[in-house]
Amino acid sequence: MTTEPMSAETSLPPHVTERLVPALGGRMQARVLVAGQGDPVLFLHGAGGLAWDPFLEALSAGHTVYAPEHPGAGDSDALEHLPGIWELVLFYDEVLDGLGLDEVAVVGHSFGGMVAAELAANSPRRVSRLVLLSAIGLWRDDTPIPDIAGTSPARLPELLLADPSGPLAETLTPPADDPQALFEAALRMASILHFVWPLPDKGLRERIHRVSAPTLLVWGERDALVPPVYADEFAGLLRQSEKVLIPGAGHLPQLEQPEPVRRAVLEFLGRP
Amino acid sequence: MKSIFFHLMPYRDLPADFETRYESIWVTPPNTELCDPQRVAQYYQWNLDELELADRLGFDGVGVNEHHQNGYGFMASPNLMAAALARRTPNNSAIMVLGNTLALYSPATRVAEEFAMLDVLSNGRLAAGFPVGTSMDVNFCYGVTPTQTRPRFREAEELIIKAWTQPGPFTFNGKFNQLRYVNPWPQPLQKPHPPVWLAGGGSVETWDLAARRDYTYSYLSFFGAKFAKKLMDGFWHRMAELGVDRNPFRAGFAQLICVSETDESAEKEYLEHCSYFFNKCLHIPAHFMTAPGYRTRKSAEFAIRTNQPGDLAAAAALEKNWKTLNEEGFIIAGSPATVADKLIEVAKTLRVGNLHALLQIGSMGHELTKKNLTLFAEEVIPRIRHIWDAEGWEHKWWPQGATERSASGTSIGTERSASGTSIGTDRSKAAPAASQA
């Protein structure tokens, strides 16, 4: 086990193991949660951090799930080795080498979706299938993505959830009277903003034509952060894609409406 | 102690319901709705008149700073103001630009060039402020990635000092500044370079830089000495750890000050302007104060350990009435004797040799500002100027070409140039001046 600060889980279920995979010639390590049996699936998380949640649990029923923690959340020095999105993509490419995965299906949520698309553009022969859940990475002037850092935490539920008063709302931010927890959450966010500040548009549009993997676009119908028009934007640029809109879901469809998301993703990944 | 009249240049006529109608004074206050260029034309004239008056009255320095998209300080380029002041301050005050936000300039040689121009234009009177900058300016207004704030600052500082001190042309291969030819014309007049004044809000990395490079450090907050105490104790503790002496001129602090004939008349004259300042000018939501990644782990942990978030929240929650503002030390107000006594106590408590006196506050009008400046210069400065004399420290960070008003006698009429030897010959003749307006 690592002594690095843990960002997400306090205790892992017994069937989930943790692997430390060297990258960048040993200068960094990726922490990867692994569980399940079957064809490999790489899951890349968003700004909320890595947690073994019911969606990953569902994926692991028929697949071997590899869920790396995005670098830099615990130790900001890690980001000095990763000045931009290009180095981050190469980092994940090396992690796949380290895991011995030549070809893999990739599922990414939000920022993780952006990285997944970049990875599939960089290594099209490596990514067999691609699932983008509420992904960032493109920009439309007529639908600007709100500034999540320049927004009061009190407004996050309405940006991220179809039901801002639902039980997920209080999981979005640490308690206001816990400065240490707030700071750890800020560092997790910082490690993602590092790659997408000030706007999440870092050139994917120029590279996305290289993606050869069939792609599933899953969007919450009521995503106020990255509205569904972005699913259409991705669809217009990808060679082969299909879109599933999830009613009653915002920016975290896999948590807010787990059942339809699980069904759509498993069906897509299970195709021959 | 050195007294610098520090002008924020605020919008003096914000609507009465500003703080309930708008999210923030900074970053997002809508410009066409709130900022009338006609009024700003008048403000700029007043602001410069006030700074020029401070020079004539015998302040040691006049100070300007940089903010962006900010209703309490619309001085996007303090260098423009400093250039105007360099030509219109015959009493040879220090020109304190506190400062240029280094991380914003790419390449950072722009700052080396403009500061060198100012130094030459003012005949060696420039104090070169190097602030890391606020999250509002750096991350939100100028789009610098929060995690790059400090790396960009560090690299810019290195490049600027090299540009000022190494013979050009030379090559600089940085992460953010990659230049084949660094060769600014001119290099500064002051040698080895203009004194560097760091300005900060309590980041421990900045203290280490002050120690390592022998720079002076000013703690800039609007919450007075009580609030600054923990921070400045931390600063001096760190200096001791690093083997740095306790020269009080290594440190400065900012203070809102209101001087009147009596303590009672001070409240009548100044309360509304102080309320305006605290309620409107400091109306900044927490999410703009610190973008994730702006603070390093080290600084954040120091802030948490010393309960800065709690103290800030408590300070923000206080009702800003006259009694509270005075008792908490957010403002120092009253008769000249009251103000001088409190300033001496505060300076000794914090161990600071540089006072950035905020004497134009919020909506304060031109006439009242002139009164505040005049009373401060005539009645307060003589009482606080010599408080560190007995310890015998040298002020190594005072611009070489600026008039040294505190070195001799008690009267501001007996000034001399501190720098007759190091700066051009005409400077030493130009120094003394009638200091009465």
Image (spheres, grey):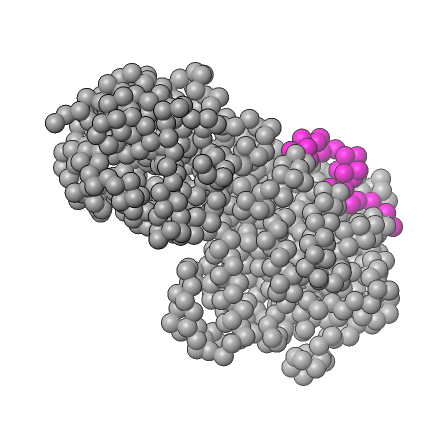
Q: Quadrant of the C terminus of chain A?
A: top left
User: Foreground residue, A26 or A243?
Assistant: A26
* Above or below for B21 versus B86: above
> Hey, which quadrant is residue B309 in on the image?
top right
Q: Residue at x 43, y 77 (%)?
A: B169
What span is colored magenta in the figure? B312-339
Q: B385 left or right of A62?
A: right
Q: Residue at x 74, y 67 (%)?
A: B395
Q: Residue at x 74, y 75 (%)?
A: B417
User: Foreground residue, B300 or A128?
Assistant: A128
Q: Is residue A258 magenta?
A: no
* Above or below for B416 versus A65: below
Q: Position of residue A143 (x, y in %)?
A: 31, 34
Q: Position of residue B203 (x, y in %)?
A: 60, 49
Residue B38 in view of the camera: no
Q: Residue at x 63, y 67 (%)?
A: B195
